[in-house]
Image: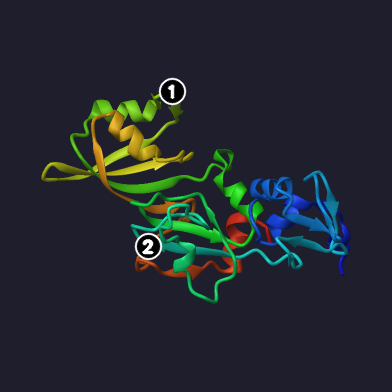
Amino acid sequence: MSLDDQKPERIAKRLARAGVCSRRDAERLILEGRVTLNGEILASPAQNVTDADRIEVDGNEVGAKEPTRLWRYHKPKGLVTTHKDEHGRTTIFESLPEDMPRVISVGRLDLNSEGLILLTNNGALTRHLELPATGWTRKYRVRAFGEMNDAKIARLRNGVTVDGVQYGKILATVEREQGDNVWIEMVLTEGKNREIRRVLEFLGLTVNRLIRTSYGPFTLGNMPEGAVEEVSKKTIQETLGGKFL
């Protein structure tokens, strides 16, 4: 065992690094009484642990920290980005190959959206990549019914407020018109829930297709729908440095 393995760390971070869940979800599991530490139900997430401690979640032992892994996934339309859907709809995790380990998505795409999702076994990495402060842009190709003009593009560039929610700067470029529809490339850094659909509806357009083509330096490329490809350790090192390896 290395000295790093003997260092204490918060249990929420350990659960995230082991690929169980994100840190935020780990805190929820602890508060729900579903986590035990050395045979005792843990009452607070403010607890440090080492590899010498035995941790269980819902009666299942949590293994040692796993090396960070990252995958690109081409999400098809019609799947939800959650581990368990209360309405019984099929999730992206149910559609992954059987030999995939437990993974967490970096951000989400809604039921009717498609395109690139990053998957990882490291909850801390998920949180890091979702933060606007990380500065990674998300690019989308959007088909919408309605008219897009320079005035609407300028409004998006300056940020808009919809139903009391402030949406930040969005860069929009019209690619082409197709009958009563228009194809738009949209680039943003935050990605709030259903952001593109809401801001375009606010401007009088109705989205009827939404495809995420990139997330930071990772692109969808020519991946077939439903395909999963693991990112090499070299690429993780080059894009994230050694922090998460």
Q: Residue at x 80, y 44 (%)?
A: 44
User: The residue under label 1 is which amino acid type?
Assistant: Gly
User: Which element carries disc 2, helix, strand or loop?
Assistant: loop
Residue 92: x and y in percent read 45, 61
Distance from label 1 to label 2 (Cα)? Answer: 36 Å
Asked if one can make out residue 204 in the rendered structure from this viewpoint, the answer is yes
Query: Viewed as shown, does residue 194 lie left or right of 52?
Result: left
Residue nearest the viewer, comparing 223 with 110:
110
Q: Residue at x 37, y 30 (%)?
A: 157
Residue 70: x and y in percent read 56, 63
Instruction: Kindly identify which numbered label has been placed on residue 164.
Output: 1
Residue nearest the viewer, comparing 113 with 1:
113
Q: Residue at x 42, y 57 (%)?
A: 116
Relative to 196, residue 221 above or below: below
Residue corresponding to mark 2: 221
N-term mark: 1 or 2 = 1
Asked if one can make out residue 243 in the rendered structure from this viewpoint, the answer is no
Select label 1 or label 2 by which is in front.
1
Mark 2, Cα crowd under 10 Å, few <14 / some 14-19 / many 20+, is: few
User: Which element carries disc 1, helix, strand or loop?
Assistant: loop
Q: Which quadrant holds residue 114?
A: bottom left
Residue 180: x and y in percent read 13, 41
